[in-house]
Amino acid sequence: MEVIRQKVGPSSADESSEDFRVRQLRARDMLRGDLEGQALEQYVEERVLTTTLDKAVSWARSNALFPATFGLACCAIEMMSIVAARVDVARFGFEAFRASPRQADLLILSGRVSIKMAPIVRRIYDQMLEPKWAIAMGACSSSMGVFNNYAIVPADKFMPVDVHVPGCPPRPEALMHGILKLRKMIQEDPDIGWRDGYHARGTEEIAEGAGEADNPTAVNVFLPGDTAGA
Amino acid sequence: MSTYREMEESITMAPVERLESDDQEQELLTLNMGPHHPATHGVLRLLVTLDGEVVRDLKPIIGYVHTGIEKTAEDKSYWKAIPVVERMDYLAYYFNAYAFCGATETLLGVDVPPRAQYLRVIHMELNRIMSHLVWLGTSALDLGAMSMFWYCFRERETILDLFEQSSGQRMHTRYFQVGGVIEDIPHGFEEKLRQFTALMPKRVGQYRDLLHRNEIVLQRLRGVCPLSEEKLLELGITGPLLRAAGNPWDLRKAMPYCSYGDFDFKIPVGTQGDNYDRYAVRMAEMEQSVRIIDQAMDGLPEGPFITTDRKVALPPRHELATSMEALIHHFKLVTEGFRVPPGEVYFPIESPRGELGCFVRSDGSSKPARVHMRDPSFVNLQATAPMTEGSYIADLIATLAMLDPVLGGIDR
């Protein structure tokens, strides 16, 4: 058997011709300010990645969603098993379930929402700090599922939902797929939050008189227009 | 006034008598726990009256996952009601389905073939282990033992794989039919089942090693919130809670159904009726369930897996192409469903949480006139207040975990 040895790293011919040491020296020159003119231009073009702050922020947000510990019914058991060893959602960084809505930014509606429960769900959603997202897990919270009766209300009727995960209950893999879809949504379209999607600008929960310049006791919600990326 | 506000204001707290010796300077505190609380195992809401850290009174408020399942079942033909009924107690779906199917079969007078009965036993006992595993994982989480959750869910996944193999679904499998089961177990099921039954007793031993000599677990459980057998019987409590107090009441032994009489197994009982006994009884039940599964698999009879009565069970698929009669039966069953002779029946079975009974009244049509479930969680929840009165609020969490209520079953 023939063993071929070659250098690890960029393997194209012109890249490999440039030694690592040479690149190191050039980087040092750049930092010292010794690089000028054409050389500097070329260096910047090659080495610096530019992005907008918005993109960087949504990248960070999308990869560190904190779901609320909020189980409703059957789906809650499958929601628990995405944290367990087989599916292990911690691979993507969504394993930190928070019991307080104040610390969570993702509400997974895991199960059927009854009419009695709906105001409470809405209240929990309102208590979460913006930016926030919601996943309707399972058929019941998306469309009332097999129980098309007086007791159940679909989530879309009382709160904005970003992703619907079908199934009864959905497999843990399906929920994880939903979360990853949400991640992609946050990364690609940070501007399309639920307020825009539902034409809900101006419905922010603000105490009376808040926002007036002479009233310093403004509440802890953003003012209209300040909700960048929400 | 909104309906919600009306509902809230209709809640009355039981007046709590202050003891004479109490320090009159202190005030009682009413604490609202839930419906969104991680330790209530669902959407249970508790209004707790506290005297310092001591629970003086406790009022459970339920109905937050009321789904109208019983009413929905009345609107569907018998075989279409099975998936709705399954979703009540969502950790014991095989039991829900069996209670309903058993009641319907009793009304119909259908004989279930022995193979179907054994297959039902295998799946129900797997379900019992699965339910206890979820209970153990989440209860240990409440007590601060984090890693138990991962171990228990690892075994749970193995069981769900078996369910998926036999029925195609992980939860709410709709495997049980009126008259038998929907399909025979596939190739490879037995092998995986044997692997599981060989492994599970070892796993239970490992869980014990982790917990039963753990000082924190013992302090949280041993001697905490006991309730006497008489009091439990007065309240109608069944299942592991009653057995923990020393009463060996188990419907599998007391009134054998579904050929449970064929199997050799023991009923674990406790002595004190405290939280530790409740924990120990369920741990031992898992081992006994494994024994039953092994025996059922060993003695699995040959024969049909569903009744051959074409008025009740669907004809085999291949007959539809050749037999006009089969086609007619198929058409009748799928469009209208079978008609059940008038009458009413109560069919109790032993679910992981106690006596699960299904009451069905038939008016002779193809839809049940009334379906009612006696759900063990609902009855057992009554024991929360007598158990926890006078104990610390931290013990309330542990007791609630050991009570193992499933809100889907309570509210239905």
Image: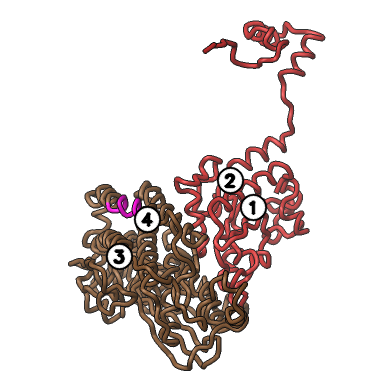
Chain colours: A red, B brown
Cα distance in 3D space between marks 1 and 4? 41 Å
Which of the two residues, B344 or B29, is positioned nearer the viewer here? B344
Residue B392 is at least partly visible in this image = no
Q: Residue B3 at x, y = what percent?
A: 60, 78
The magenta stretch is B193-201
Cα distance in 3D space between marks 2 and 4? 38 Å
- Per the image, the residue denoted by label 4 is B193
Which of the two residues, B39 or A129, is positioned nearer the viewer here? B39
Cα distance in 3D space between marks 2 and 1? 9 Å
Q: Are marks 4 and 3 on the same chain?
A: yes
Q: How many marks?
A: 4
Answer whether labels 2 and 1 touch (C-beta < 8 Å).
yes
Return the residue found at the far right: A38
Q: Nearer the viewer, mark 2 or mark 3?
A: 3
Q: Which three-letter amino acid code belongs to the residue tagged 3?
A: Gly
> For the residue labelled by badge 4, is the local secondary structure a helix, a strand or a loop?
helix
Task: Please tell me the numbered disc located at residue B299.
Answer: 3
Q: Residues within 10 Å of mark 2 (few under 14, many from 20)?
A: many
Q: Is residue A187 left or right of residue A107?
A: right
Q: Residue B364 at x, y = what percent?
A: 52, 92
Return the residue found at the far front: B322
- Per the image, the residue denoted by label 1 is A133
Q: Quadrant of residue A151?
A: bottom right
The residue positioned 59% from the left and 15% from the top of the image is: A8
Q: Which chain is mark 3 on?
A: B
Q: Which three-letter amino acid code belongs to the residue tagged 1?
A: Trp
Q: Quadrant of residue A45?
A: top right
Q: Which three-letter amino acid code belongs to the residue tagged 4?
A: Leu
Cα distance in 3D space between marks 4 and 3? 14 Å
| Chain-order first, disc 2 or disc 1 | 2
